[in-house]
Amino acid sequence: MSTATATSPTFIRSDYVVLGGGALAVVLAGIAHYAGWGEVMPFVLSALAVTLLASLVGRSVEQLGDRFGPGATGVLQSALGNLPELFIALFALKAGLIEVVQAALIGSILANLLLVMGLAFVVGGLKHGHQKLDSQRARTIATLMLVSVVALVLPSLASYVHTPAAAHEKALSMIVSVALLVLFVLSLPASLRKGSTGLSDEMVHEAPRWPIALAVGLLSVAAIAAAFVSDWFVSALEPAMASFGISDAFAGLVIVAIAGNAIENVVGVQLAARNQSEYAFSVVINSPLQIALVLAPLLVILSQVFGFAALTLVFPPMLVVAVFLAVLIAVVITVDGESNWLEGAALIGVYVVVAASFWWG
């Protein structure tokens, strides 16, 4: 266990890697963007910069954890961890890339529920055998996830079956967005209750290594840098897609979704490897929950406030089917109360099949 005073930050090797690598990636991404380094290099560098900035956000939030309590830290990590994805989506809407944004929203949910959860189950299962998920908190999150996704896709269903509401998809999307945001606010008191996670894993905490001013300062710097890098990422996205022959749907569903969820991609697997399976499940599933409850509704509202291409909650049928099935799988696994590496391999297999289904659009 390491200790730190209020004035002397303590950095470990991985901190230096994230800080130095993030700064270097941002600088190189900026040079590539403004110097016009072809069609691929600006995209690769900006994607790397987004990922490292997301990791920096995660580390900064971890250093605030013991000050604010685990519940508040979880909410803060989810909210700030989605900042890069929020900026990317806003710039994409400004560029008129509605299909990319819709695919990225659904892709983020799918990536966490199938790919990241699958990796966590495989790593944890191979290392520790069967792992328990029997947690009231985890079951509550999974149920709330199912309810949120049902509300999220109802405008799509109204459009498919040509109900009278289909002609008012913008208004219906706004109503659903407000309802989801209200649901998020109502869920905050339980989440923010200090010292209560509802998880039975034995948590291993280390003393904060950074002063609170440094952690908050790095969060602010990362947020500002993420805004610039997200703009560069979106600018490089279309030329890169044309160069690789990638469809808008695949770019949003896989590339943007994975780049914008770097924190959960790493943290969930690390926790499972430490045999903290219930906590890992909570971290992995909390991210798509925040996307359904906060990010998607917020983008619907902001797209109209800022006058960008109007985002609605009417998604292509394949996206709706894929996300609904992914949530059902997560709920079934939660009810079962345990996980193993074979279930994880199956989840990864499903994700590969879904991703391949969108390669052509």
Image (cartoon, rainbow, N blue to C red):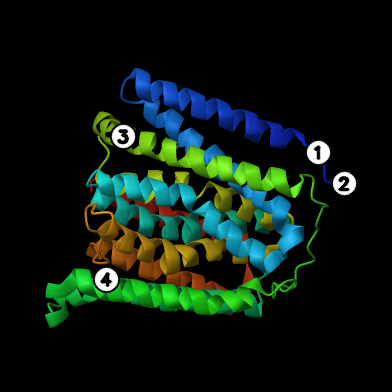
Secondary structure under the numbered disc 3 in the rendered image:
helix
Percent x, y of residue 245: 25, 34
Estimate the spatial distance between the alpha carbons at disc 3 and disc 1, rounded to whole Å.
37 Å
The residue labelled by disc 2 is 3
The residue labelled by disc 4 is 173
Relative to 149, residue 208 above or below: above
Estimate the spatial distance between the alpha carbons at disc 4 and disc 1, rounded to whole Å.
47 Å
Sequence order check, earlier mark of 2 and 1 = 2
Secondary structure under the numbered disc 1 in the rendered image:
loop
Check if mark 2's residue and mark 4's residue have beta carbons within 8 Å. Answer: no
> Mark 3 belongs to which amino acid?
Ser
Relative to 187, residue 281 above or below: above
- Depth check, front residue: 300 or 154: 300
The numbered dot on residue 10 is 1
> Mark 2 belongs to which amino acid?
Thr
Characterize the local packing of mark 1: few (<14), some (14-19) or many (20 or more) Cα atoms within 10 angstroms: some
Characterize the local packing of mark 3: few (<14), some (14-19) or many (20 or more) Cα atoms within 10 angstroms: some
Sequence order check, earlier mark of 4 and 3 = 4
The numbered dot on residue 235 is 3
Residue at the spot 73% in from the left edge and 49% down from the top edge: 212
Sequence order check, earlier mark of 3 and 1 = 1
